[in-house]
Image: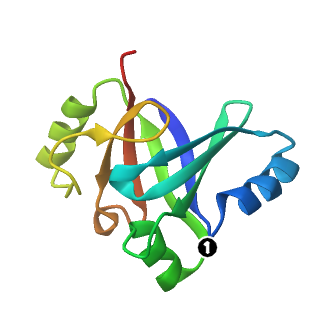
Amino acid sequence: MNKVEHIGIAVNSVKLAGEIYAKLLNTPVYKTETVESEHVITAFLQSGPNKIELLEALNDDSTIAKFIAKKGEGIHHIAFEVDDIEAEMKRLKAEGFVLLNDKPKQGADNKLVCFVHPKNANGVLVELCQEMAV
């Protein structure tokens, strides 16, 4: 794993949260995107090398909606950049980690993603991210 790629924060509104984080970080939202496969709207902010992903549920069945209903708004996941997501998934499986998807899937911000079950990471949902070829 190369670096922390971003921190994901579950919010009720990416618009309102985007305004708050833009003031907090003194930088604007640079990208908003709908990810239908995850039933979310995302907004990204970057300050130096650090990125924040705000996640708003598109519907009540969304994982984000369920997360907010159970825990409230807050940190949802931490994402790590990897060079080869399939190799990293294979390595983690061999180490005994439970992955939440069998194959990488398309995520936000032009990334292939895979999630590691939080029970295997001290209650933290871990996302693996690999830049997709353009």
Q: At label 1, which amino acid type do we have?
A: Glu
Can residue 64 be seen from the camera position used here? yes
Task: Provide the secondary structure element on which disc 1 rests.
Answer: loop
Q: Nearer the viewer, residue 84 or 17?
A: 17
Query: Crowding at label 1, few (<14), some or many (≥20) Cα neighbours within 10 Å?
Result: some
Q: Residue furthest bottom?
A: 70
Q: Looking at the figure, which quarter contains the C terminus?
A: top left
Say above or below: 110 vs 92: above
Q: Quadrant of residue 30?
A: top right
Give the residue drawn at x 39%, y 48%.
127
Say above or below: 60 vs 49: below
Say above or below: 30 vs 120: above
Q: Horizontal and vertical percent for residue 82? A: 37, 30
Residue bearing mark 1: 73
Give the residue drawn at x 21%, y 54%.
99
Left or right of 37, for residue 58: right
Give the residue drawn at x 44%, y 40%.
80
Q: Horizontal and vertical percent for residue 51? A: 63, 40
